[in-house]
Image (tube, rainbow, N blue to C red):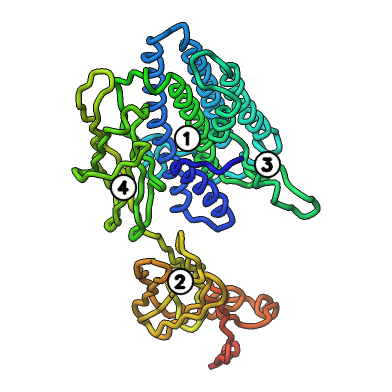
Amino acid sequence: MSIPKEPRQLMINLMYLVLTAMLALNVSAKIINAFFRINDSIQANNSITDTSNDNTFESLDLNAEQDRTKYQPLVDAAKEIQLVSDDFTAYVETLRDTLVQDSGGYYPDDDKNHHGQPKGYKNKDVTTRLLVNDGMASTLKNQILGSRAKLMEIVNELNGAEGTGIDDASLGRLENQISLGIDDAYKREKKPGRDSVTWEYFTFNQLPLAAVFPLFSQYTNNMKSSEAAILNFLIDQLGKETIKVDNFIPISSPRKSYVIAGETFETEISVGANSSSINENVRISVNGQNMQVDDQGKAKYSVRTSGTGVKRYKVDITLTNPTTGNVETYPGEFEYEVGRRSVAVSADKMNVMYIGVDNPISVSAAGVSSNELRVNGSGAGLKLTKTSNGKYIARVSSIGDAKVTVSGGGLTPTSFDFRAKRIPDPIARLAGEESGTLGNGVIRAQSGIFAELDNFDFDAKCTIAGFLMIRRPPRED
């Protein structure tokens, strides 16, 4: 497999690698939600690609009217390509639905915390059992490789067609642009007792259902991107001098649609269904600012990000329509999301710290190495001792409010408040009783008086140092 040349495809592949790496972490609910946000982002890109592909096909069909005898085979091939893409997309969606239904279905849309999400979003058993053990991933792999072969088979039938430049060399270049396929990274993975693992095991074993969603969306995106590459290849065969174009679509290809505050947002902006006949006169502006356009009709827009949230930018493309000769402007509006690196601090035992005992603390931050984190404590005599990466022991010496502050790795300093409390008073019990009357047989059976800490989760024990016993003989003072 070759490295994709399109920034959008590179972004998706990078997200795939990030998701795979994150599986080794003890992910929080925020990370689980991030899988669905990334999935939504990829699906939004899929919708944009669908619209672009439909318009490219319409443009191909319209321009084929120059000579139906010569160019109709291109239109017919484009229809077959779209059918292969639709069939593959439907298969992936069916596979996704099967996993969801086997793990309990979806939460209702009115659920405030998980609206529209699968109930088994953390379920690793259903993905491992169905995809790896029952062979569904093998079927998916065959679908991916088979669909890729079908795409190239359809285009190969046009080799040497009259009025086109399709030959072995051009088909070879096209095949390198087909992103649908199987990554061979699994061949370098080793498992104890084996020289290598299968793609199915490497990709889906012990993968939570939430992480499967963006992977499936990525496979669909690879198909739609491959469809787009072939449709653009077919429309290029109509010829530079005779092509008729009457519809233009602004296309924005961001390197990342979600960036961290302080990073640079960068995107490539170009015209859909374009040809060299329009690139000479094309002008592109973003939010009213003219961009420098290269000889391929592309402009690069970059802006330093600051505040968080969804950011929008407006694109206007002005060019001379080769069909009508009129100067026309085609607007488009796009968006990206800016977020901040997130951090979490949790008390391993409970949400308070107790005086006189070790209080275990875990610190983690999404997107930041634990080696880069700086963790400081203040208030209530709080002192922190690092025991390992992300693990600390907190000790407090007075009642009050304690504060843990986390920074480093580009993270904005973030504080978390805790309450420092004394250990509850121990209660002395004999035979499990605090007071009352006990028979002499019960008393003889006891090994001693014990001090117990009620409703206290720490492994703390109190020892009886001494006690006063008063004996009252029968019928005497």
Taking the spot 57% from the left edge, 23% from the top edge, the residue there is 167
Circle 2: element type: loop
On the image, the x and y values in percent for residue 120 come to 53, 41
Residues at marks 3 and 1, CA–CA distance in whole angstroms: 28 Å
On the image, the x and y values in percent for residue 216 come to 53, 36
Marks 1, 2: nearer the viewer: 2
On the image, the x and y values in percent for residue 347 come to 47, 68
Dot placed on the residue nearer the N-terminal end, 2 or 3: 3
Marks 4, 2: nearer the viewer: 4
Which residue is outermost to the top?
A: 69
Marks 2, 3: nearer the viewer: 3
Circle on res. 68: none
- Kind of residue at disc 2: Leu
Marks 4, 1: nearer the viewer: 4
- Kind of residue at disc 3: Trp
Q: Residue under circle 4?
A: 301
Marks 3, 1: nearer the viewer: 3
Which residue is outermost to the right?
A: 193
Q: Residue under circle 2?
A: 373
Q: Is residue 115 left or right of residue 391?
A: left
Circle on res. 199: 3
Q: Residue under circle 1?
A: 106
Dot placed on the residue nearer the N-terminal end, 3 or 4: 3
- Kind of residue at disc 1: Tyr
- Viewer-nearest residue: 396 or 46: 46
Taking the spot 52% from the left edge, 24% from the top edge, the residue there is 85
